[in-house]
């Protein structure tokens, strides 16, 4: 069953310089037990998109069009109070900065027990037992529950936050760069733990990251975002093996492969488009080594493939483009037409 479904969602920010369309007509869905990676460079709209799901857009941000269904209920129609009840219990969020949200004057145990009791009829003793169980699950010693946040390292704080986020077995966890501040080993341990926990009860996750290696290691599906749009979506192994959009091909080159040959890392020259301006044609055209005239004039159409889709005018030539995209010289600035 579809757990979460986004239909044609566009999100605008009002600024003194004008309107920014940070997310443009996005359609996406996630099923029970799926781990979806949302990947793309800074500023492509990942955080904006997930904030709209949990109803936490900043004041100058609005969902201009579209629908967001969670278990067949349109989240955009809920009152603030109804949304607050869903948050944490059904839809839980972990952010990079969450570890700073632990209150320095209370013991960790108190903070977890309070949070559990705020959402569930449960005795203090039982909530404490649940906190102990969660600590074990995220790889923390039970004995450390009675410490204060300053006695924890960054990795321990992040684990405690994950324990809290998972306390009520939420149906979906939205994790925004949850481990970026931590070292690579701790990062991969924590992601592995979250995955195992979700597997136990068929929970789902949207994992937001700019790191393709993290996606490859953690997710079942991937949505690649560029300039406020999803340019490619599919099953992770398939997208890594045969990326169809030139931006995905470029992103793949820019991160070390965990399996297979060790290739040189190649970055994509240039910067993402300014979303203040209306963009004609494909949003990646100015940085794409394969752009043709049509790319500046028309929006590319959606090409559906098995378990996925992508948007590119040169869809028929993708096998050839894949070979070219793996070569360093393809991505040299002078080879990219403006
Ligand atoms: N509160 C805001 N007011 C105005 N513009 C905003 C606001 N928040 C984000 N934006 C703009 O919206 C666009 C998308 O930003 P967003 O933070 O969603 O991207 P992102 O992919 O999550 O980037 P990052 O990886 O850096 O978090 C950017 O152009 C950004 O400048």
Image (cartoon, rainbow, N blue to C red):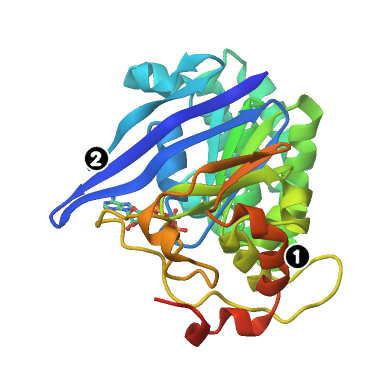
Could you tell me residue 311's position as x and y percent? Answer: 54, 48
**Residue placed most toward the observer, 117 or 1:** 1
The reply to whether discs 1 and 2 touch (Cβ–Cβ < 8 Å) is no
**Residue placed most toward the observer, 72 or 273:** 273
Could you tell me residue 22's position as x and y percent? Answer: 35, 48
Instruction: Give the residue at mark 2.
Output: 59
Q: Which of marks 1 and 2 is in front?
A: 2
The secondary structure type at the circle numbered 2 is loop
The secondary structure type at the circle numbered 1 is helix
**Residue placed most toward the observer, 193 or 286:** 286
Say which residue appears at 55% left-offset and 84% top-offset. 332
- Quadrant housing residue 11: top left
Could you tell me residue 72's position as x and y percent? Answer: 53, 14
**Is residue 134 depicted above or below 181 in this figure?**
above
Is residue 120 in view? yes
In this figure, what is the number of numbered marks? 2
Q: Distance between the residues labelled 1 and 2?
A: 37 Å
Please give left or right for residue 322 compared with residue 261 in the image: left
Is residue 138 in view? no
**Is residue 78 depicted above or below 26 in this figure?**
above
Query: Mark 1 or mark 2, which has the lower sequence index?
Result: 2
Instruction: Give the residue at mark 1.
Output: 185
Query: Which numbered dot is residue 276?
Result: none
- Quadrant housing residue 58: top left
Say which residue appears at 54% left-offset and 74% top-offset. 268
**Is residue 145 depicted above or below 90 in this figure?**
below
Q: Quadrant of the C terminus?
A: bottom left
Say which residue appears at 40% left-offset and 16% top-offset. 82
């Amino acid at each position: 069953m579809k757990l979460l479904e986004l239909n044609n969602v566009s999100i605008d920010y009002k600024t003194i310089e004008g309107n920014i369309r940070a997310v443009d007509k996005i359609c996406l869905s996630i099923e029970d037990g799926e781990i979806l990676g949302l990947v793309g460079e800074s500023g492509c709209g990942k955080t904006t998109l997930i904030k709209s799901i949990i109803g936490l857009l900043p004041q100058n941000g609005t969902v201009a069009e579209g629908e967001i269904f969670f278990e067949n209920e349109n989240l955009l129609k809920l009152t603030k109070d109804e949304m607050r009840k869903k948050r944490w219990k059904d839809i839980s969020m972990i952010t990079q900065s969450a570890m700073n949200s632990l209150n320095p004057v209370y013991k960790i145990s108190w903070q977890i027990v309070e949070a559990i009791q705020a959402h569930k009829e449960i005795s203090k003793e039982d909530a404490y037992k649940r906190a102990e169980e969660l600590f074990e699950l995220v790889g923390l010693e039970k004995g450390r529950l009675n410490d204060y946040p300053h006695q924890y390292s960054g990795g321990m704080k992040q684990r405690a936050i994950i324990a809290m986020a998972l306390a009520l077995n939420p149906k979906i966890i939205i994790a925004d760069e949850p481990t970026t501040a931590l070292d690579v080993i701790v990062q991969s341990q924590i992601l592995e733990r979250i995955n195992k926990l979700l597997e136990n009860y068929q929970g789902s996750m949207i994992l937001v990251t700019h790191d393709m290696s993290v996606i490859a290691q953690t997710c079942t599906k991937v949505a690649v975002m560029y300039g406020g749009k999803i340019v490619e979506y599919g099953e992770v192994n398939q997208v890594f093996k045969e990326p169809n959009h030139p931006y995905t091909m470029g992103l793949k080159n820019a991160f070390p492969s965990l399996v297979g040959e060790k290739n040189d890392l190649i970055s994509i020259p240039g910067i993402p488009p300014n979303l203040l301006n209306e963009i004609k044609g494909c949003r990646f055209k100015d940085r794409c080594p394969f752009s043709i005239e049509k790319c500046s004039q028309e929006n590319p159409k959606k090409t559906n493939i098995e378990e996925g889709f992508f948007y590119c005018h040169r869809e028929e030539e993708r096998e050839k483009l894949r070979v070219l995209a793996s070569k360093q010289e393809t991505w040299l600035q002078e080879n990219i037409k403006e």
